Image: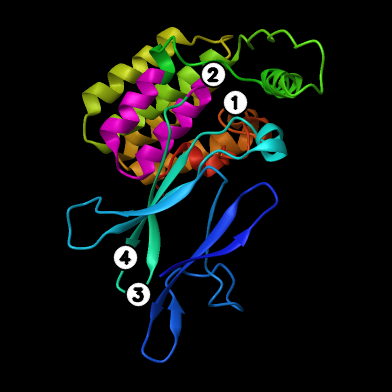
Amino acid sequence: MTLLVGVMSQGGHTYQIYEWGGEKFRNLLISEYPDYPDGGGIWVEATGKILYQNMDNDPLNELVLDSGIPVWSTYVDFLPWRNKRTVYDWNGQNFIPFHDEFAKPEFRFQAVQDGDLAFIQSEFDKALSLYQDAIFSDNLKDYSPEIQKNLQDNWRAQIGNVRPTPTPYPADPTEYPRLAAYAYYRIMLLHLVRGYETDAMTVFNTLEQKFPEGNPGHPYIEMANTFMKEYQSTHDIPASCVVAIQYATDNPEILVPLGSDYHGWQSHTYKPEDVCPFR
């Protein structure tokens, strides 16, 4: 039994899922709050929906949440937005979220973030394709704090709050080399995880050629170099991640173009440990 238990002013709504246990109904969603064990719920925007689908051809349907796109002030304050699909699997007691994916990326940073998400979900072919898009695709758009503000002003102009419509803001010339260098670095990691050491070294050499000292992407080469030196010595990926993470800790500015406060509500805000997910 799926119950709509709350509707907010801008149309977002919360659902809970209950099963009759013989004496009372039991919520099948785990609560985030230990003091309220029956408080588990799932949130969707005004345009979102939930449904039950068999995603893996087993006897049970999975719970699928399409977040939808928010409307009005939530939309403009925290853009850019995409639909986020979360699949909940049944573990015998509860529905547990186990897989996330976003709609097709519009901006280059989204392709990078989607690649990292696919990577940690062991979707290696998908991750590789997304990293390659981040490097080579001409269809992905640039992003920056100024571009975010321009998009917000443009949205407000369409509803009459700003006149005239603002002109587009030029791209930050440092964003592409930074995101591309990071994507090459993640492809190098991906090859190593899959046991393709020769391919990993080819990508590493490409990094050094394309992003020399003075290039905005060069700090990601330095991070890759610290990783590779440790890996060539130990052939231990988690140990090599430790030194890469330390480099990101010592140089936190490399995290900002990957995902920060100006990348929107859905964006992952990068921390040092995100640059190398094996520890």
Contact flag, marks 3 and 4 (Cβ < 8 Å): no
Kindly identify the residue that appears in the image at 50 percent across and 45 percent down.
48
Amino acid type, label 3? Gln
Q: Can you identify the residue that label 1 sits on?
A: 257
| Image quarter of the N terminus | bottom left
> Which of label 2 and label 3 is nearer to you?
3
Q: Amino acid at mark 1?
A: Pro
Counting residues from the N terminus, which is met first, the one under dot 1 or under dot 2?
Answer: 2
Circle 3 residue = 93
Locate residue 239: give its quadrant: top left
Q: Is residue 221 visible?
A: no
Whichever of labels 4 and 2 marks the residue nearer the N terminus, that label is 4
> Label for residue 185?
none
The residue indicated by pointer 2 is: 178
Foreground label between 1 and 4 = 4
Name which quarter of the figure residue 227 lies in: top left
Magenta residues (range): 106-133
Tell me whether the residue at label 1 lies in contact with that at label 3, contact meaning CB atoms closer than 8 angstroms.
Answer: no
The crowd level at tag 1 (other Cα within 10 Å; few <14, some 14-19, many 20+) is many
Task: Name the residue type under label 2.
Answer: Arg
* Residue 109 magenta: yes
Asked if the residues shown at circle 2 and circle 3 are in contact, with their CB atoms under 8 angstroms apart, the answer is: no
Q: Amino acid at mark 4?
A: Trp
Q: Residue 90, which numbered label?
A: 4
Q: Are marks 1 and 2 in contact (CB under 8 Å)?
A: yes
Q: Identify the residue shown where x is 30% and y is 73%.
A: 92
| Marks 3/4: CA–CA distance | 7 Å
Sooner in the amino-acid sequence: mark 2 or mark 3: 3
